[in-house]
Image (cartoon, rainbow, N blue to C red):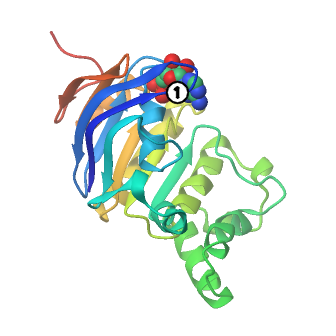
Amino acid sequence: MIRFYGVTKVYPNGVKALDNINLHIKKGEFLFLVGPSGAGKSTLTRLIFREELPTRGQVLFNGRNVARMRSREVPYLRRRIGMVFQDFRLLPQKTVFENVAFALEVTGASSRDIKRRVPEVLKLVGLEDKAGMLPAHLSGGEQQRVGIARAIVNNPVLLIADEPTGNLDPETSWGLMELFQQINKAGTTIIMITHAREIVDAMKKRVVALESGRIVRDEEGGGYSRED
Ligand SMILES: Nc1ncnc2c1ncn2[C@@H]1O[C@H](COP(=O)(O)OP(=O)(O)OP(=O)(O)O)[C@@H](O)[C@H]1O
C-alpha cells in the first residue's frame, strides 16, 4: 500500500530528517515507528500525508507517486488517511458529536449520513453516552477516543497515530490500544509512532526503528529495543 523508494528529506534549514529510506507497508499491517526524538518519525508520516515532499526518492500510496499528485487529488488522498495526535486536537467549542461530524461535513456528507454514521462510530469507541458533551468535560482517554472516532469516521484505509498515548496514564493507554487493535482487525492499516516501550513489547507487531533519519531495524513481532 505504501512504498518508500530511496527517500531523503532535507528541510530548507539544511537538516536531513530522512536519509535514503526504503520501506514497504502492506495493507492491513500494524506498524510501530520508534526511535529517539528527532530521528525522523514524524517527517516520515508527513511525507505519506503529503504535508511535506521528499527531496529525493519517491513515496507511493497505492501505486501513486504522492509528490506527483495534482492539488485537487490531495484532499482525496487525505480523506483515505485518518490522523490521531498526542494532543487530541479537538475543537473545544464543539460537542463530541460535532467534532466527529465535522470530519464528515468537510467531505460533503449529507446530514442524513452524518446522523447515521456519527452515533455508529461513537458506539465503536465507547462514547455513545457522551455525544452532547464538550471535550473539556471529558477525561484524556475519552478525548483521545473522540480523536480516534474523528479519524475513522470516513473509513480510512490508513490510520496514522503520532504518540496517541503520550499524554495518558498506562491503564488508559491499554484501553486505547485495544481499540486500535480492533480497528486494525477490521482492516485498517495502522502506523503508530510511540515511545511507549511496554506497549510495543507486549503487542508483538512489526517495529521499524529510525535513528538519525535511517532505518536501523525492521522487525516482525519485535520489541521497542533491539534484544542483543
Ligand atoms: N519543518 C521543519 N523544518 C526544519 N527542520 C525540521 C522540521 N521538522 C522537523 N525538523 C527536523 O528534522 C529532524 C527530524 O524531525 P522529526 O520531527 O521527523 O523527528 P521525530 O522522530 O518525529 O521526533 P520526536 O520524537 O521528537 O517527535 C529533527 O532534527 C527536526 O528538528
- Disc 1 under 8 Å from ligand 1? The reply is yes
Q: Is residue 205 visible?
A: no
Quadrant into which the N terminus falls: bottom left
Q: Position of residue 188 (x, y in %)?
A: 34, 60
Picture residue at 52% right of the left edge, 27% below the top: 11
The residue depicted at 79 percent of the width and 57 percent of the height is 134
Q: Is residue 68 above or below residue 22?
A: below
Mark 1: which secondary structure?
loop
x and y, in percent, of residue 149 in the image: 55, 61
Query: What is the quadrant of residue 139 in the picture?
Result: top right
Residue 45 screen position, x and y as percent: 44, 41
Looking at the image, can residue 172 be seen? yes
Where is residue 55, by image quadrant? top left
Q: Residues within 10 Å of mark 1 (few under 14, many from 20)?
A: some
User: Which one is in front, 196 or 71?
Assistant: 71
Of residues 68 and 83, the one nearer the viewer is 68
Q: Which residue is mark 1?
A: 11
134 vs 187, nearest the viewer = 187
Measuring from the top left, give residue 118's x and y in whole percent: 60, 74
User: Which quarter of the figure is the C terminus placed in?
Assistant: top left
In this view, which residue lies farthest toward the top? 228
Say whether residue 34 is left or right of residue 81.
Answer: left
